[in-house]
Image: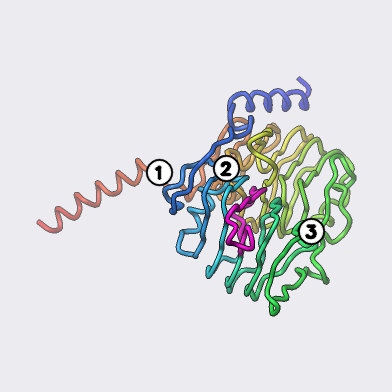
Amino acid sequence: MNRKYASLGLLLLLAAFWGSSTAGKTAKECVFNGTFVALEDNCTRITGSLMFTGSDAINTLYSKLAYVEEINGCVQVSGTSYTRLDFFARLRTVVCTNSSLSVDFMVANNSALERLAMPVLRVSRLGLTFNPKLCITSEEGARYTNVQRGAADNFAICQGRAGVLKECNSTQNGMNAGLPDGCELIVGNLYVEGTNNQNITDKLQYVKEVYGRVYIRSTNLNTLAIPLLEKVYASEPIASATLEPTILVASNTNFTKLQVPKINFMAKNELAFMTSDMSYVMDQDLCNQLSPYGNVMSNGTVCVAKHTSDPKLWSSIIASLAIYLSVVVS
C-alpha cells in the first residue's frame, strides 16, 4: 500500500480510537467557591471571581484551568511570584459585573512577573500596576486596548535577541513554514508542511514560543530540530473545535526524529504528541519531555515516560521495605 495512504488510514483509525480526544471538549460550566483544589476538572466556563495570591500550587492551576475559555466574574492576580500567567493559555473572555471595581482583570504587585502569556485573552478593562519585570509584546499591545495603570507604571515592550521580540505568522503549505528570518514567537499555529523546506532549520533556530499548535505534515524531512522552543500554548478554542494533538506529525515521507530539547511548558491536552508515520520511532527523551503535558502516541502506542512511577512497582518496593524493617527491628 502507498505509504501516504497507509499513514492516513492509521491516522483515521487513531482518531476513531481516541474519540473524545479529537472531537473537542464539551462545554462545561463550573462554579468557583474559593479554592482551586476543589474546582471541578475540565471546566471551560467558570462563574465566580478568582483571586490569585500565590498560595496555590502552580501545578494545580495548570491542571484545573487548562481548558478554561470564559470567566463570568472578576480576576485578580496580586502579590504572587509567578513569572507568567500561562495557566490561562486558552482564556478568551473575562466579564466582571462588579460595578465597584475599575477593571475586569487586575494584575498588581507581582515582583517576578515577566510576561502575561495569555495569548487569546480579550478583556475590556485590564489593570497592570507595580509589576516591575513585566514586558508586553507588540501583539499584546495591540490586543489589550484598554490598559489601566498607575502614573509610575511604565512597562516595556518585550525584547528579543536583536531588539524588539520578533513575532511571526506561519502559513499552511508555505515555503519554510511561511516564516521570515529571526522569528522568536509564532502567533498562531506553526505549519511545517509540504516539500519546500530547504531552509526550515534556519527559520526555526530562534523560535521560543508558539501560541497555537505544531504541525509537521507531508514533508520530505528526515529530522527537525527546534532547539530553543520552550512553550506551546495550543490556544485555539477547545469546546467548539476539533481538539487536535499539541504536536502532530503526519503523512511525511521518511520522518524519523523531532528534537525540542528546551520544552518546559505545553498546555494540557489529551494528546501532547501524535504521529501516524510508519518511519517514526519514538525516542525516550522526547517521550520523557512531552508526557507531563498529555499522552505521547506513535503509531497507536502510547509511550511510557521513564520518570512515570508504576504503582505496582512502588507497592512491591514498600512491601519489601516493610518486611525488611520488621526483620531489622525484631
Which quarter of the rendered picture does the C terminus lie within? bottom left
Q: Residue drawn 59% across and 26% down?
A: 19
Quickly name the residue at label 2: 45
Q: Are marks 1 and 3 in contact (CB under 8 Å)?
A: no
Name the N-terminal-most of marks 1 and 3: 3
Magenta portion: prevailing SS class: loop
Which quarter of the rendered picture does the N terminus lie within? top right
Is 48 magenta? The answer is no
Distance CA(mark 3)–CA(mark 2): 25 Å
Give the amino acid type for the residue marked by disc 3 in the picture: Glu
Q: Nearer the viewer, mark 1 or mark 3?
A: 3
Eyeballing the image, is 128 above or below 65?
A: below
The quadrant where residue 246 appears: top right
Whether residue 56 is visible to the viewer of this picture, yes or no, is yes
Mark number for residue 310? 1
- Tell me the SS state at disc 3: helix
Q: Which residues are magenta?
A: 84-106
Quickly name the residue at label 3: 139
Is 92 magenta? The answer is yes
Q: Residue drawn 61% across and 59% down?
A: 85
